[in-house]
Image (cartoon, rainbow, N blue to C red):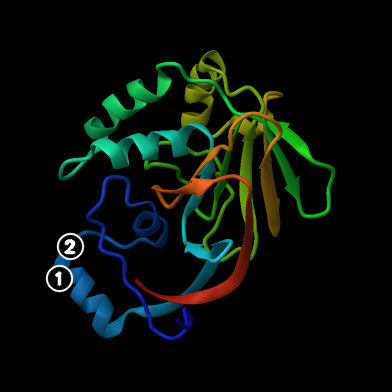
Amino acid sequence: ADPSRTPLLPLALGTANMLAGALGIPRDPVVLAELIERGALRRIDLGLAGGSRFLGVAGVGFDAMVTEAVRRTRRGTLGYPGYALPILRTLRGYRAPRLRVTLDDRAPEACGFLIVAKLPNYGGLFAVTPDARPDSGHLDACLFRDASFGGLVRIVWPAWQGRLAVRNDCLVTSAHRIRIETEDGPPASVQLDGDAWGKTPVDLSVEARVVPMLVP
């Protein structure tokens, strides 16, 4: 109930292990035991989506649709190959939603796909928000203005290189509060930390340096 009370130590047993990577926490169980005994405390931000919490990333649009496909079909462990079929199923008949994104009190921005992150690495592969830090006190965001199939293909290499901020079809920015709504059509899918969460509208916010983590 009180996220500031108990120190946490993430076990890097997933596919991307984004949080453990950002905090420098290895897989080695001996090192993990040493961190429990003698690790330093680092307080990181708590992301909020309504009444739900997240520590790493939130996505609205394509990646959230993939997480829904994963939830429907998953059997056992995933690994990167386990995402191939859900991605292909999502692309079949895919249409990007029309999103309206309000960053703090600024004028709304239009996009078709949005990633909001507290970590510099997305999925263990891409630098979508390369300046993001888990204790920055704000949310970093990347808005993909063209989220069509062709638009998604065009941003793969720049996302690998961490160069989305120089592109006209992307907006890389930061905010303390982000509201995401759908302009028209059905509500858009939302994921939190890689798990399907629900649909738009959604309000994202951050509480600075709340969660104590055990780190090297």
Q: Secondary structure at mark 2?
A: loop
Q: Which residue sits at x=62%, y=45%?
A: 141
- Residue 120 in view of the camera: no
Q: Where residue 148 is drawn, which disc sits there?
A: none
Q: Are marks 2 and 1 in contact (CB under 8 Å)?
A: yes
Residue 184 versus residue 127 in the image, above or below: above
Would residue 73 be found to the left or right of residue 52 on screen?
Answer: left
Q: Is residue 128 visible?
A: yes
In the rendered image, which quarter contains the C terminus? bottom left
- Which residue sits at x=53%, y=26%? 158
Report whether 17 appears left or right of 167. Answer: left
For badge 1, the amino acid type reads Val
Look at label 2 and name its amino acid. Asp
Q: Nearer the viewer, residue 168 or 116?
A: 116
Q: Mark 2 — residue?
A: 28
The residues tagged by marks 2 and 1 sit, at their Cα atoms, a distance apart of 6 Å
**Residue under label 1:** 30
Where residue 107 appears, x then y in whole percent? 84, 43
